[in-house]
């Protein structure tokens, strides 16, 4: 290999600036490599067995390996090994015209960025040369260490394992004529969610098979052998078949090895050139078969078995990521780059194919570069109940609206792991039907329903937020106590929404049966600490937990949430009949101001109760009535949208796409919360009261959840946590005297 500088050759394509090493032309390049295998008027190669197509797929795989290593080496940081072990599979997908590619593995990011560079997608963010690719890797406003929707051509974020399949399935559901491959590592295959979520999805949607897992079976995970490394090929195939996959297509590099490499996992880049071509052709033919199978109605997986780190600086888990010693000046990095180096002419062929594949750069063609058309909902028919009238169930009032949304929007999906009936929203099932292969009117089951009920919060949250990310409306319903198991992917998507370059419907949740309603079930069903999770996320800028105090308010909150974009909105409401305390107009105002005044009695001194929730209002009203007999005034303020109560400088709102800079001003805050003493009250985490406690100058205190216990009633559980009228009254008197 010879090292040259870009200016050493006038024929050097501009995009190659920054490539440090170029190689001699590979054998027969003039015959099979000089003319791009994808014609100028085509979107894919003509045949997976065409010699030129196979040859150029190999070139593309080597180009991806080279860029992945040079980009990570430029910062001595990042993860080249996993992507390198499946480079032939990714190259094959592109050469076959498939670009809606997602990954389960955040560590594949530098490989995906290299692919986006090759097809010119990154030009949309000012990256035209390899030097710029190197400069902006792992830098602010550049190419994040893990994938994000901020990057042109990238369909979905990737970070925590166990998530990528949700994005692929969501996209497949919305775009049934397109293929959505996603790479999944054998290190991450141990996550329980991956297989179970695909199995349930396939049972619910047996005809939606146009997502394609690409298992990267390389024998290693991040720091050691993968847990499936000892499986035989037959055992791995049986594993996928046992989980419902009708077509399992496996290509094992070991079968092509002519270098007597030890072990079950080998590096195809060490083969003779002819055997490298044979292996590449096998991958290309197999990927083509797998793609056709998936698009043709069979649940299909493609497995590429090749040693981790194939073709880069190290092998096995040692190739997973770079350390400070792994610089571009290090001999082992130089050697690896020189071994993979392509000729200038080969680079041009690879780029031309990448640009033509799929009809153009991913940034111009993949489904997430376009906003999905949304059904017109019109004005939802909110039903306003009389203040002070008969108690109503908040969740049921919202459920009626959810049914109407689903009937107007056929892409709309409701997900729930623990059953809508148990949350007072059985009317959703009646209107939209649970997706189930067994039709049963008694249980509101039908194969073509719009209520998705896997017994996994991850699967519920995953499909719901995946649909929102892909541009559709959805609703994830859960018990507050169990939702924590689905929050990692919800958080991933809400963060991605803060960065998106397009509008998408907000991801909306309804969390019911809060801790106070779950007394008899004990602490296993009492986990309101989830509210602390959302309290911290409010500072993110696009996260809005809302707490409607009654059935009117819940309807208004849902109506508002449906009209928002690129936000994460959490509605927490009770399934018990509770008093109607507000009008629709009051909540609409409360959503803008953050809170509304429910009750005010004058006195020599005035105590302000800042209350989050609905049941928690009951002891507060009792306390206010007692204070009145003592000549002490009280204001009861219902906090509906606490994010609005922060100061603008507390929140990163201006860094978000679809930025929302709505915050209550100091004068309005003083009008609502000013008094001689302030007591914050919540049946959940005290952290949710932070915006009020930060801004108040009054003597103040907080009453909040402490821990769970088995009790016979909500009142008894509140008493266990010190949330009683007597305790509130006593503290109020202490504060004002």
Image (cartoon, rainbow, N blue to C red):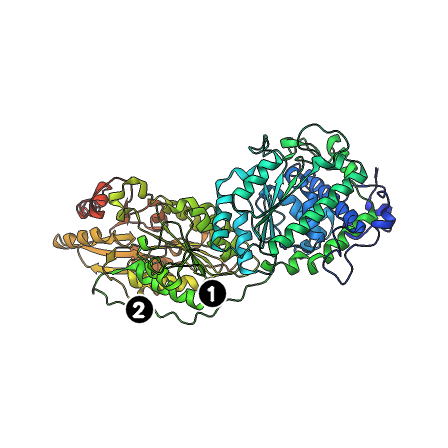
- Using the image as rendered, state which of residue 280 and residue 166 is in the foreground: 280
**Disc with the residue nearer the chain's start (2 vs 1):** 2
Few, some or many residues within 10 Å of mark 1 (<14, 14–19, 20+): some
Side of 364 relative to 12 (left or right)? left
* Percent position of residue 321, x then y: 63, 35
Q: Are marks 2 and 1 in contact (CB under 8 Å)?
A: no
Q: Is residue 186 among the parts visible in the rendering?
A: no
- The label shown at residue 383 is 2
Residue at the extreme left of the image, as rendered: 629
**Disc 2 from disc 1: Cα separation:** 23 Å
Local secondary structure at mark 1: loop
Q: Position of residue 500 (x, y in %)?
A: 55, 56
Q: Quadrant of the N terminus?
A: top right
> x and y percent of residue 386 in the render?
24, 67
Q: Nearer the viewer, mark 2 or mark 1?
A: 1
Q: Residue at left 31%, top 68%?
A: 383
Left or right: residue 534 versus residue 113 is left
Residue 393's quadrant in the figure?
bottom left
Query: Would you say 395 lies left or right of 220 here?
Result: left
State the image coordinates of residue 398 (x, y, percent, origin top left). 34, 61
Q: Is residue 19 left or right of residue 704?
A: right
- Rendered view: 219 above or below 363: above
| Placement of 206 over or under 484, stated as above or below | below
Direction top: furthest residue: 262
Q: Name the residue: 14% across, 52% down.
A: 626
- Residue 314's image quarter? top right
Q: Can the viewer see residue 171?
A: yes
Q: Which residue is mark 1?
A: 410
Label 2: element kind: loop
* Number of marks in the rendered image: 2
Pointer 2 local density, CA inside 10 Å: few below 14, some 14–19, many at least 20: some
Which sits in the foreground, 437 or 312? Answer: 437
């Amino acid at each position: 290999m010879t090292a040259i500088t870009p200016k050493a050759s006038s024929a050097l394509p501009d995009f190659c600036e920054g490539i440090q090493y170029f190689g001699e032309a590979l054998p027969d390049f003039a015959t099979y490599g000089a003319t791009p295998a994808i014609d100028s008027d085509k979107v894919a190669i003509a045949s997976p067995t065409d010699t030129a197509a196979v040859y150029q797929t190999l070139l593309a795989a080597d180009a991806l390996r080279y860029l992945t290593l040079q980009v990570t080496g430029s910062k001595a940081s990042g993860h080249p090994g996993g992507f390198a072990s499946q480079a032939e599979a990714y190259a094959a997908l592109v050469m076959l015209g498939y670009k809606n590619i997602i990954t389960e593995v955040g560590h594949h990011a530098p490989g995906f960025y290299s692919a986006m560079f090759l097809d010119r997608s990154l030009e949309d963010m000012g990256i035209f040369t390899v030097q710029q690719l190197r400069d902006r890797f792992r830098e602010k406003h550049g190419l994040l260490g893990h994938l994000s929707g901020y990057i042109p051509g990238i369909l979905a974020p990737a970070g925590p394992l166990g998530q990528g399949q949700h994005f692929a399935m969501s996209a497949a559901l919305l775009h049934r004529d397109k293929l959505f491959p996603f790479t999944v590592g054998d290190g991450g295959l141990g996550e329980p969610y991956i297989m179970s979520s695909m199995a349930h999805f396939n049972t619910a949607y047996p005809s939606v098979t146009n997502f394609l897992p690409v298992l990267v079976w390389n024998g290693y995970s991040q720091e050691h052998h993968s847990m499936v490394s000892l499986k035989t090929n037959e055992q791995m195939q049986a594993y996928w078949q046992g989980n419902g996959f009708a077509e399992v297509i496996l290509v094992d590099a070991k079968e092509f090895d002519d270098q007597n490499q030890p072990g079950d996992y080998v590096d195809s880049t060490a083969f003779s050139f002819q055997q490298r071509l044979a292996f590449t052709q096998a991958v290309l033919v197999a990927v083509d078969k797998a793609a056709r199978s998936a698009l043709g109605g069979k649940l299909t997986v493609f497995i590429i078995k090749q040693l981790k780190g194939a073709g880069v600086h190290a092998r096995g888990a040692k190739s997973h990521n770079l350390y400070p010693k792994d610089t571009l000046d290090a001999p082992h990095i130089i050697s690896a780059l020189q071994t993979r180096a392509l000729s200038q002419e080969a680079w041009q062929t690879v780029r031309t194919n990448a640009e033509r594949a799929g009809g153009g750069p991913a940034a111009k063609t993949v489904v997430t570069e376009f906003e999905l058309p949304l059904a017109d909902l019109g004005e939802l028919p909110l039903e306003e109940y009389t203040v002070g009238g008969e108690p109503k169930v908040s969740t049921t009032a919202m459920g009626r609206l959810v049914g109407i949304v689903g009937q107007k929007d056929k892409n709309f999906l409701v997900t729930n792991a623990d059953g809508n009936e148990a949350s007072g929203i059985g009317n959703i099932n009646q209107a939209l039907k649970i997706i189930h292969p067994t039709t049963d009117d008694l249980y509101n089951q039908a194969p073509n329903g719009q209520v998705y009920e896997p017994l996994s919060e991850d699967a519920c949250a995953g499909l719901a937020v995946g649909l929102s990310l892909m541009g559709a409306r959805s609703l994830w319903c859960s018990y507050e106590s169990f939702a924590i198991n689905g929050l990692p992917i919800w958080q991933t998507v809400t963060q991605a929404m803060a960065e998106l370059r397009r509008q998408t419907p907000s991801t909306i949740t309804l969390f019911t049966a809060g801790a106070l309603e779950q007394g008899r079930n004990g602490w296993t069903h009492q986990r309101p600490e989830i509210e602390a999770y959302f309290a911290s996320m409010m500072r993110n800028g696009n996260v809005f937990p809302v707490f409607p105090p009654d059935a009117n308010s819940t309807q208004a909150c849902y109506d508002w949430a449906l009209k928002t974009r690129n936000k994460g909105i959490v509605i927490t409401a009770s399934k018990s009949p509770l008093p109607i305390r507000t009008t629709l107009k009051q909540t609409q105002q409360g959503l803008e101001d953050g809170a509304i005044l429910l009750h005010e009695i004058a006195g020599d001194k005035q105590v302000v109760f800042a209350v989050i929730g609905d049941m928690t209002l009951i002891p507060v009203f009792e306390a206010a009535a007692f204070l009145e007999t003592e000549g002490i005034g009280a204001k009861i303020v219902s906090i509906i949208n606490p994010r609005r109560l922060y100061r603008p400088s507390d929140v990163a709102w201006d860094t978000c796409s679809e930025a929302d800079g709505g915050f209550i001003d100091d004068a309005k805050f003083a009008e609502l919360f000013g008094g001689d003493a302030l007591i914050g009250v919540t049946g959940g985490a005290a952290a949710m009261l932070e915006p009020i406690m930060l801004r108040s100058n009054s003597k103040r205190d907080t009453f909040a959840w402490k821990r769970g216990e088995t009790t016979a009633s909500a009142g008894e559980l509140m008493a266990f946590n010190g949330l009683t009228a007597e305790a509130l009254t006593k503290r109020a008197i202490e504060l004002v005297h």
